[in-house]
Image (spheres, helix red, strand yellow):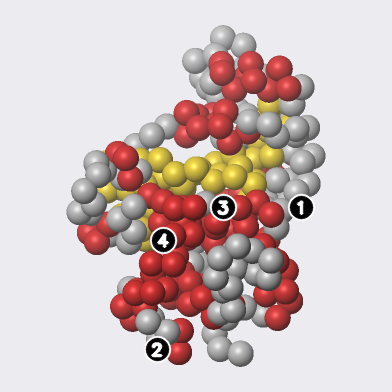
Amino acid sequence: MRRYELKDADWARLAPLLPGKAGDAGRSAADNRLFLNAVLWIARSGAPWRDLPERFGPWNSTYRRFRRWAQKGVWQRVFEAVQDPDLDWAMLDSTSVRAHQHAAGQKSSALAEALGRSRGGFTSKLHVVVDALGNPLRLRLTPGQQADCTVAADLLAGLAVGAVLADKAYDTDALVAGCAQTGAALVVPSKRSRRVARVLDRNLYADRNKVERFFNRLKQYRRLATRYEKTGASFLAFAHCAATFVWLL
C-alpha cells in the first residue's frame, strides 16, 4: 500500500456512504476508492492539483469532481455519517490558518470566502466543537478576524451535552443563557469584567487539551496547515475530509 492511501477497513466503512454506489441514480462511480486516495494524497501532501501523480488519472477531472462534491455537501454528509460521539461534554475552540497568496483572486469578496485580516495576516479561522473524547462534531469557517464566541451557538445548536468547555474568549452572556436553557454546565473561565466570577471545575477544564490535540492532528494535513483554496467551500471540504479520517483512525 502506498503512502496516504486508504486501508481496506476504512474503505469498507466509507464505501456505502459515497455517491455512485449500487442503487444510486446516475452513473456508477466504480473508481470511488481511487478518487478518495487522490484527494487524500492532495490533502496530506499539500501539493498543487496539477502535481497529482498520473496513477490517479487526469488531475483536472479529479479536481472538478472534488469541487462538485464540495458544492453538494457530500464531504460534510460523510463526515457526519461516521460519527459515534460521546456527549458527556463538548469542547469549543478555533484555529487560525494562514492563507497562501494562491488563495487570493476569487471573483467573490474575500469575506464571502472566509478570508480576512488578523494579527497573523491574511487568514481564515476554523471553528470546531469536539466530543468528550476529542473527536470532531461540527466545523465552521469564518474570516480570520471574527471572534470565536460569534459561532458558539451555531456549533452547539441541537447538541444535548452535559457540559460545555471553552476558554475565556467564549465567556458571553449569550452562551451562559444558552447553557442554562439546555441544562449544560458551563466550564469556561470568567472574564475579569464579570462582577461575580463563576466557580470553575479545573479538573474538567483540563480536559480541554483534547480539542488542541485535534487541531494538531488536523494540521498534519498540509492542505489545512496553510490555506491554498480560493473558495471557502473547497477549504471546508478538505477540513471535513480530514476530520472524517480522524474518526476512522
Residue 238 rendering spot, x and y as whole percentages: 47, 60
**Disc 1 versus disc 4: distance between alpha carbons?**
27 Å
Q: Nearer the viewer, mark 1 or mark 2?
A: 2
Amino acid tagged 3: Gln
Q: Give the residue drawn at x 32%, y 61%.
A: 228
Q: Nearer the viewer, mark 4 or mark 3?
A: 4
Viewport quadrant of the N terminus = bottom right
Residue farthest to the front, as pictured = 26
Mark 2–mark 4 distance (CA, rounded to whole Å): 19 Å
Q: Secondary structure at mark 4?
A: helix
- Give the CA separation, mark 2 to mark 3: 27 Å
Q: Which residue is mark 1?
A: 84
**Residue located beneath label 3 in the image:** 76
Label 3 near label 1: C-beta < 8 Å?
A: no
First along the sequence among labels 2 and 4 = 2
Q: Which mark is residue 54?
A: 2
Secondary structure under the numbered disc 1 in the rendered image: loop
Question: Which comes sooner in the sequence, label 4 or label 3?
Answer: 4
Q: Quadrant of residue 5?
A: bottom right
Instruction: Identify the residue position indicated by label 4 in the image.
Output: 67
Residue type, label 2: Glu
